Image: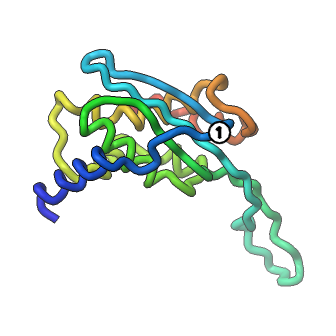
């Protein structure tokens, strides 16, 4: 795709955002704004905990591999208002995050967030493009934003996330 097609893709996400709205009884909720331009985004997440087979290989084929609990994003929504870039970025990010586990969220860098946009973002619009990413990452660092998820699953994975800000 060329730059024009990517821009059209962003405009489509702005006009028809994916995952816009609210979740009943979310496990995670955080809201932030960009005071420079007035953009505001709130993200809500519903997590699900599933058991998955561990990655340990056993030499004895009759033994069972222990299952590990993994918390994944079951549903993610955003709401708010702002420029086309901030709203389209939130739409793209929520689509990308569905089904991801905590480790995936931890590894999701600002460069990857910008990569979802597939257009060059000027320094003046960088805060707009990263607002949804910041809402998610900053919110996961604060215990008051998370319910129904064991903190040992959230905190160890995100303790070094400030390095990416």
> Which residue shows up at 74% across the image and 67% down it?
53
Q: Nearer the viewer, residue 163 or 154?
A: 154
- Using the rendered view, name the quadrant where residue 38 is placed: top left
Furthest residue toward bottom: 61
Q: Quarter of the image containing the C terminus?
A: top left
> Which residue shows up at 50% across the image and 35% down it?
43
Relative side of 8 to 147, left or right: left
> Residue 29: horizontal and vertical position, in percent?
58, 31
- Using the rendered view, name the quadrant where residue 148 is placed: top right
Furthest residue toward right: 62
Q: Nearer the viewer, residue 56 or 151?
A: 151
> Which residue shows up at 37% across the image and 50% down it?
92
> Which residue shows up at 47% across the image and 30% down it?
42
Q: Nearer the viewer, residue 54 or 26?
A: 26
Q: Circle 1 sits on which residue? A: 24
Classify mark 1: helix, strand or loop.
loop
Q: Quarter of the image containing the N terminus?
A: bottom left
Relative side of 22 to 57, left or right: left
Position above or below: 96 against 124: below
């Amino acid at each position: 795709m060329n730059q024009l097609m990517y821009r059209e893709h962003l405009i489509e996400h702005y006009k028809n955002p994916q995952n816009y709205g609210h979740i009943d009884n979310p496990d995670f909720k955080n809201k932030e704004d960009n005071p420079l331009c007035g953009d505001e985004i709130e993200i809500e997440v519903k997590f699900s905990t599933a058991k998955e087979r561990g990655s340990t290989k056993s030499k004895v084929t009759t033994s069972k591999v222990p299952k590990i609990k993994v918390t994944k994003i079951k549903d993610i929504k955003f709401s708010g208002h702002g420029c086309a870039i901030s709203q389209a970025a939130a739409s793209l990010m929520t689509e990308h995050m569905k089904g991801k586990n905590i480790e995936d969220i931890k590894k999701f860098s600002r460069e990857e967030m910008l990569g979802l946009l597939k257009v060059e973002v000027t320094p003046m619009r960088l805060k707009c493009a990263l607002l949804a990413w910041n809402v998610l990452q900053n919110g996961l660092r604060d215990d008051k934003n998370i319910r129904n998820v064991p903190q040992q699953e959230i905190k160890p994975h995100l303790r070094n996330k400030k390095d990416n800000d």
